[in-house]
Image (cartoon, helix red, strand yellow):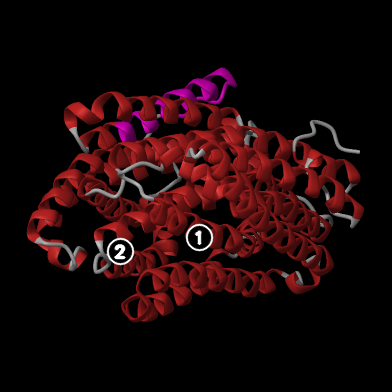
Amino acid sequence: MSSDSNKNLKTQSAGLFRVGILVAIGGFFVTSTTAWCYGVSAEAVAFFAAWSVCASFQKLLQAGQLAELSLPRYLKDKKEFGAGHALKHYSLLANWATIAAIILSGTLAIVVPYFSKILLPGFEESQSTKVIELFRGLMPVIPVIVYSGFMQSLGNAEKHYGKFEVWLFFGQLVAAVSVIVLHNHVGVWALVWSAWLTQLVAIIGRLFYLHKFGCRPTLSLWIKGYSPKQLLSELGLTSTYVIATQFYILSLNAALTFLSPVLFAVFKYAELLFERTSSLVLRPVSTVFFTDASHEFTREKSGLPKLITNTLTHFADYWILYFCIVGACAVPLISLAWGNKKFDWESVLLTSQIFGLLAGAALFRAIGLVFRKNTIAAGSARRQYMGSIVVQLLMVLITVPVVKTFGFWGGAAVLCINIILFSISDILAAMTTNIKPLALIPYKYFIKTFILSIAIIITARVLSDVVYAQTLTQFGNQRIADVIVLIASGLFVIVTLETVGRAIGLGGVRILFSKKTN
């Protein structure tokens, strides 16, 4: 890979990172308004349970996998047959996936109440009834999410990075404001409205940008020369994996219902924080890499090994900043934003601990993601998904026993084990694409990154304990103490990464924001 290509990777991923910060802030804002308005109440528990069931059934549609599989094919069709043909084919997949989402949403809204004892075994009947009501309110948003995801992937294929995430940020702001305004009037249903508003604003913005760039998806449901058998074949490629994933997710959610309501809510808050902020690490580099790797496979792919190594190195630069900020700043930030009578200090500590654990595991997810994208870009998706199926079936076997034995921390362990096993599976699958993944991992860079991150977090936590003690003694106000500790911890992390990190050969902080690379 040329040095120009490496600069392209760094420059474009830096642009996505800057936009990703906005999305992460928006996600944290939405989660914070939820925590502030509902805390760990029965209403919050019901909504999280409903959304978890809703999200698990959404995966049955395989929309994410189809969009992922379609990107390399879209680029290949565009090169061979032109942009018009490629867009029609891609639109066909998006349209059928959306129709399937509409049918599935309506069907599940009818039949799911009959399976509440299986899906929510630890809930009482009154709790289950509330969860089902909220689930029915959330299901119609699934077709919007599915179609929006296809449009996002299309924008990435055309290298319009970052434009669509801005609209997701606007949707998050609208959603957060709606929760604040409506929660006293409609109760927990304000969260359902916020989910709707987030996705509607996002899809409107994405379609606007696609039309602006001259990329107009069609509404066609049939194309001459493209039979339904081809579509069914692509669906069948990932169906077993999706079903295995559903069993894992449902088994985890079912096991978590046996926790106390407070612990269940705390666990889901930590999951939400990770899902809404981990994109800072995963999305900027992986999005650019997947498009570049797909282009490499349409050529001679001679630059692919170097592209993989550079991508993993750049991933480490994003991860260390994310991990250190979460490890050092999660407690004061969550306490400042959420701490009140509905969300006590113990809940703050537990949420920050699970959040920090998942942030650490994000490095494994990043490594696996690079090799996963490479395997799919190489056209070896079947091998990729076979390994993923094995992982999910193994998780189904161990999830319930682990959570029942170890409770709250057993659930956290299950999430981390799943991430690590997926990374191993992705590496093994990549070995079938004529590359040597273990030889492409920059081990020395990763080791330096890991050691420095642990040192920074431990030092920051010790200093924050001292600062907390002094400020609480002097001011006697938790909010003031949170602000001081948050600012001090954040500055310590950034300054240390920029000075010590660069001194030992790491990228530092500035490289993640720079518009130009040396």
Q: Pointer 1: residues within 10 angstroms few (<14), some, or many (20+)?
A: some
Residue at left 65%, top 38%? Answer: 487
Instruction: Please give the label number shown on residue 253.
Output: 2
Q: Pointer 2: residues within 10 angstroms few (<14), some, or many (20+)?
A: many
In the image, is residue 357 part of the stretch drawn in magenta? no
Percent from the top left, x then y, of residue 315? 71, 53
The reply to whether residue 320 is in sight is yes
- Against 208, residue 247 (above or below) is below
**Sequence-first disc among 1 and 2:** 2
- In front: 292, or 382? 292
Q: Which residue is mark 1?
A: 353
- In front: 474, or 434? 474
Q: Is residue 287 left or right of residue 499?
A: left
Alpha carbons under labels 1 and 2: distance apart: 20 Å
Residue at left 61%, top 38%? Answer: 484
Percent from the top left, x then y, of residue 132? 15, 50
Residue at left 49%, top 55%? Answer: 352
Look at label 1 and name its amino acid.
Gln
Q: Which residues are magenta?
A: 194-218
